Image (spheres, rainbow, N blue to C red):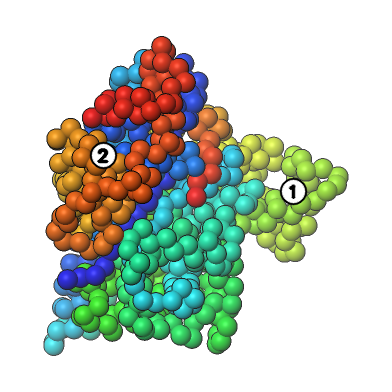
Amino acid sequence: MRDRERQHSEEERRRHSPGAPHDEDGPDDDGIDELRAETASLLEAAGAAIGNALSGNSSEFVREVRQTGGQ
Amino acid sequence: MDRTLMGMETEFGFAAFDPSGQRLSDEEWVARLVDSVRRQRPSLLGRTPYDAFLGSGSRLYVDCGHPEWATPEVMSPDEAIRFSRAGEQTLLEAATGLEQSSPKLGRTVLFKCNVDYVSGATWGAHENYLYTRCGLSELSRQMTPHLASRVVFTGAGGLNPSSPGIDYSLSPRVERLDSDTGNRHAVFNTRDEPLAAHAFHRLHVVAGESLCSHVSDYLRLGTTALVLKLCDAGLRPVEDMALQEPLAATRAFASDSSCTVRVPVRQGDPISALEIQRRYLQQVKSYSGAPFMPPWTDEVCTTWRLVLDALEREPTTLDTVLDWPIKLAIFKQRAHHRGIEWDSLPIWNRALRCHLARKKPTKRLPRDRDGLVAMLRAAVDLPDVTDALVEQPQLRGLSPSEFWESHTALRAELCEINIRFGQLGPLGIFDSLDRQGVLDHRISSDEEIAVAMDAPPTAGRGRVRGEQIKLLKSQRRKGICDWARIVDSSRNRVLELGDPFISETPSWKKLHRSEESLELPETFLSSSVFLRRRQDSAVTNRTSRPDVQATDERDG
């Protein structure tokens, strides 16, 4: 996220600089492709993590670890 | 000197199992968990059962059966995250140590979660913010719209516990809040127990949830502390934005993953969570650099703005950043995997609610096409939509019975994923994603978190507390501790820490007879004896004064 902040600040500076192009429309102007790739990576990794984590009997697991109330 | 202090308290879910998989006594093993931490790290006893203050200035105790970790008082959201995650590592190490050293114990499960979908119980993560001047009723007016609308970035995500269906909520715990303002489960909690000298007040926020993403926690703490700063400086950031029904508004915001829903305000047009947050952001930014604002104001504002921009543009763009969008992406994937269209679920949920609310003829779910059509049409008067939905299971090759089986199985799986998401250790889904480098949420590094497991904060009374606990333990002295003082019972003296901003260690004072209540509390004895009894079957029912000494010697 900090990288994203830095990147955003740089983009802001570039956009607001005198002479900066106002229309940068292109195939990946808003970084949508990059975000889609990030989501795809997330879901691929999540699939593996879930496969590793799930008990095989979710109803039973949820009952097994039931909790009393907190504050 | 910056006069900002805050802290977090996280209640963890915990379960222990014997080697055959049978659940063990919560009371015994939570106590052993606290004891295990105390054996691994310098600490002093606290004043309640299973209670310890540690050399990092943090506190570990048992609250309502849950292990609860309270960070020391810190001056920035970065620091709070560091000490909060250090608490998780400390608990995980202790649990692992228990598993390795206790033959009766097979495994433990420690998790950050907020709702139990079996018992209906709820727990969470509370925040504390120090303030000095603002009156409680004015604070409630100014803070409530913030606390209601911040769920768009502070929500943990998960299934709505009040819904029988698969109903996503940005913040499941809000369903268990019971009032707008009050001293229990309210949007704005009025309990003002300063745990400090009389000049100070503590804003205690209980509406929050345990979060995994650093950015979610960073914004939760950073934005709330900054809004409080404005109020405490006598400013009125949202004079004209009072919500008509704060609790209902919080729930409405939490139920809308598009972040566009608007709620009524007392004056003017309905308003969205993002609009409310932008108003706060604008106010905070306009006072950035003022003497009463902390030095990290601009940094928080930058992240705040970026996140609001992203939520406005498309919330799914934060599905590697914030808790609820990450969890939502995973839930959608699992639904797809089971042949259920996520976008159709709101109508199925509505139909289910209507169906289950009927008294007759039966609450059994329909098993044929006609039954499904009747169920849907009773809830949604849009024949085209309901007919299309009924076709969906068939298109996927599922009979109505198989569809419900799949639906039920998906709901159970999502409940397990909800728990596994915040599980500490290698099986934890969030931790696993983080280790694989597919998330973009980090504020604190592993190295910084490791340091905070043992080193106290660099300023304030948390530093003094941590340093003195380490010193007393290195000298093998006995003592007890609470947030505002340390008692050195070996030397019959007390260290007053009523000033939370104390920069130097004050002088120890003689402990007078009238302060004997500061000595080891009877409530702790029962827990310590309980542990001893378990450890040594020869010891039974010892609650007399000699046991205090025996327990203390073991502690030393």
Amino acid on which disc 1 is placed: Leu
- Residue A56 visible from this viewpoint: no
Locate the N terminus of chain B by quadrant: bottom left
Q: In percent of the image, x 23 and y 30: which residue is there?
A: B556
| Separation (CA) of disc 1 from disc 2 | 61 Å
Chain at numbered mark 2: B
Of residues B532 and B312, which is closer to you in this image? B532
Give the mark toward the camera: 1 or 2: 2
Q: Quadrant of residue B120?
A: top right
Is B48 left, or right, of B293 in this rendering?
right
CA neighbours of label 1 inside 10 A, class few (<14), some (14 to 19), many (20+) = some
- Residue B84 image point, x, y percent: 30, 49
Q: In percent of the image, x 20 and y 70: which residue is there?
A: B2
Of residues B211 and B549, which is closer to you in this image? B549
Q: In percent of the image, x 35 and y 67: which residue is there?
A: B198
Mark 1 falls on what kind of element? helix
Mark 2 falls on what kind of element? loop
Residue with the mark numbered 2: B489
Residue with the mark numbered 1: B356
